[in-house]
Amino acid sequence: MTRKFFGTDGIRGRTNAGVMTAATAMRVGQAAGNYFVRGGHRHRVVIGKDTRLSGYMMESALVAGFTSVGMDVIMTGPLPTPAIALLTREMRADLGVMISASHNLFPDNGIKLFGPDGFKLSDEVEAEIEALLDVEPQLAMPEGIGRARRIEDARGRYIHALKQSVSNEVSFDGLKVVVDCAHGAAYQVAPSAIWELGAEVITLGVDPNGTNINDGVGSTAIEALQAKVVEEGADIGIALDGDADRLIVVDEKGAKVDGDQIMALIATRMHEKGALTGGGVVATVMSNLGLERYFASMGLTLERTKVGDRYVLERMKEGGFNIGGEQSGHMILLDHATTGDGSVAALRVLTSLVRSQKPASEILHLFDPVPQLLKNVRYEGGAPLENETVKSVIAEAEAELIGKGRLVIRPSGTEPVIRVMAEGDDARQVEAVVDRVCDAVRAAT
C-alpha cells in the first residue's frame, strides 16, 4: 500500500502545504482518536510539541480533532519527544502525540504517534489510521465531547526521570559541559538536569523564538558548539536536535563524535558490567563497518536494520537487545526509555566520563572508522533502480567490495533522491564505486 501521509517517522512536511496543514492535523486527531477509542473508560491523549511557530496551529487542530471524537486531551507545551512517550505511559493515556519535524528547520513540522505503552506505532497501525483519514469520522455526542487541559509539571516530571537514569553514586561535580539544545524542545529540561547533577553548564541554542529551531545550532550544525567547547575549555559538548531524540557529542578538543562512537562507548560499559542484553547492539545499514568490527573483536554482534529508529526498535524488542541507535545520533536505551532519547544518552556519556577520569577524546574514540562516502542523486521520475544497466553496475560494485567493504543503495522516503553509500578500507576504491553507481543512476533518469 502506498502511503500518502505517514513516512518513516510519522507525518512530516512543509507547514501549510501538502499534508502538513491544520485541516490534516484535525483529521489525524479524529482518525487516531477513532482508532484508539475502545471500551467504556474516559479516553486520554497526551500532546507535546517542540518550539516551532506552527506548533500552536497544529496543536489546536489536533485538540479539535481528538476532542470531537470524545478523547480528553492533556497538553504539555514544549517537551522532547521521549518525554511525551514517557508521560503517555505514566498518565495511563491511550495515545501520545509529538508535534515536531525533528532536525528540520522551522518551516517544516510533523506528527509522531505513540501507543499506550510509550512505543511508536507500528507500520500496520499507522496504515490503519491512514485508511481512516478517508472515512467520515465517528463524532461524539454533545455530552461526550472531550475536555482539554494543560499540565504545568510536565518538565519537572521529565527532569526527574532523566536524573533517575543516573546512579545515586554519580555526581558531575567538576565537569564543565556545553549543552546545545538547538533552540528546540529540550531548551529548559536538558541543561537543568545536567546542572542539577552537579556540572557547570554553558548553554547554546536555548532561546527559541519560533523560527530559529535547528538554525546554525544543534546536532546537525555543530560548528558553534565545537568553537564554544574550545573557547570555554570545556570537558565535553552535548548537541541535541529540535525534539531532542538524537545526540551528537564534541570532545574537549572540538572533534565531532557521531552516534556510532557513542553506541560503542555505552555498549562497552554495559558489557563490562554484564548488563548488555541480546549479545550486541542494533543499528542501521548506515553505521560504519569499523563499529561492526569493533564489536566483533569483543565477541558482540552488530545487527543492522533499514534506516529509521523505529526499525531499530522493532529489532531490539524482537531480539531482546537493550541498546540500539543510528549513526545520526538516535540512541535507544530500553532500560531507560521507549524511544530515542538524546538527553538520557548524554547522561550515560557524562557518567562514563566521570567514572573513567579520562578525557572525552580518549573514551569516545574506541574504534577507527573505515572510509565512508554518501552521495545523493536526485531524479525527475521513473524508477532508476529498476533500470537493467543500473542493476548491473550495482552488482559489479558489490562484487568488487566483497571482503573489503559494503555498498548501500536506498531511495529516500521523503523526496525523489537515491542515496548511494559505500565504505571500505581503500578510500579511493570507495569513492570510485560511489561515483560509478551515481553516474549510472543519473544516466537512467
Image (cartoon, grey):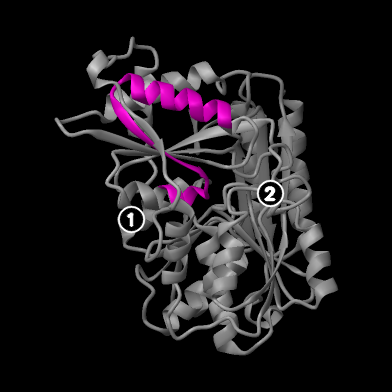
**Left or right of 185: which side holds 48?**
left
- Secondary structure beneath label 2: loop
The image shows a total of numbered marks equal to 2
In which quadrant will I find the N terminus?
top left
Q: Residue at x 27, y 14 (%)?
A: 138
Residue located beneath label 1 in the image = 317
Q: Residue 361, image x and y in percent?
A: 71, 79
User: Which stretch is magenta?
Assistant: 56-84
Q: Does 18 sit above or below residue 294?
A: above
Closer to the camera: disc 2 or disc 1? 2
* Type of amino acid at the residue the image marks with label 1: Lys
User: Who is closer to the viewer here, 437 or 212?
Assistant: 212
Q: Residue at x 48, y 62 (%)?
A: 159
- Secondary structure beneath label 1: helix
Q: Residue 60, image x and y in percent?
A: 49, 26
Q: Residue 299, image x and y in percent?
A: 44, 78
Residue 380 seen in the figure: yes
User: Who is closer to the viewer here, 213 or 147?
Assistant: 147
Q: Earlier in the sequence, mark 2 or mark 1?
A: 2
Point out the residue furthest to the left here: 40
Q: Residue at x 62, y 29 (%)?
A: 54
Residue 82: in magenta span:
yes
Residue located beneath label 2 in the image = 183
**Left or right of 267: which side holds 274?**
left
Q: Residue at x 78, y 50 (%)?
A: 432
Q: Residue 329, image x and y in percent?
A: 59, 57
